Image (cartoon, rainbow, N blue to C red):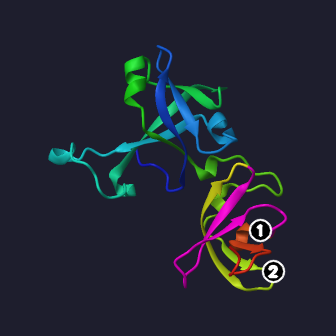
Amino acid sequence: MTPPDDLVELGRINEPYGLKGWVNVFPDTEDPAVLLKASSWWISRLRAQGADSGAVRKALIAPDDLEFELFRVLAVKRHAGRLVAHLEGIESRELAQSMKGRRVYVPRSRFPKAEDGEYYWVDLIGCAVTSTLGNALGVVKAVIDHGAHAILIVTRADRKDDLLIPFVQAYVSEVTLTEKRIVADWEDDYL
């Protein structure tokens, strides 16, 4: 089965949970609402690498190195800061152990609608960022969780260093996803 083009990584599978095939899932976000509501997950694994499969990989994993399997989620619940899930076809601790290290994805098209003033981080990536004075600052290449708030990592074409802009109302005055544009009370020389 071919995976959809809009898959978004939302977590990773760790150790088995219990004896009946449940797995621990560590979400990539504090609010795992999408994982809790999705009826199925796409789960990645490395493609078979042939004779050198035991060799240490020195390069980053490319999308073509992955293959995806679709699993129906039989049950999922919050447990001690993570999720525990039972996936169709994973009925033993040994099978659950074989899932360790795999990544969990859900198509972006399956995400619930965000509330007004709330944004999925994946939608902010690629947005052009300008200052309130109209100066181009760069493009959002990633969003990270700083604990207190999210931070936009903005790459600049003319410089090697990135801007780190707190994604809070005090600094971000406008987000227009349809135009892939963010206006921030920030300047190019701010540290």
Q: Which residue is drawn at the image coordinates 71% and 74% (left, top)?
A: 179
Disc 1 to disc 2: CB gap under 8 Å:
no
Q: Work out which quarter of the rendered image holds the C terminus and state it.
A: bottom right
Q: Work out which quarter of the rendered image holds the N terminus and state it.
A: top left
Q: Which residue is drawn at the image coordinates 56% and 26% (left, top)?
A: 85
> Is 59 inside the magenta-drawn segment?
no
Q: Which residue is drawn at the image coordinates 37% and 49% (left, top)?
A: 66
Tag 2 residue? 132
Residue at the far top: name it. 19
Q: Which residue is drawn at the image coordinates 80% and 85% (left, top)?
A: 133
Image side of residue 61 versus residue 109, left or right: left
Q: Which residues are magenta?
A: 148-172
Within 10 angstroms of label 1, few (less than 14), some, or many (20 or more) residues? some
Tag 1 residue? 175
Pair 1/2: label in front: 2
Answer above or below: position of 105 versus 125.
above
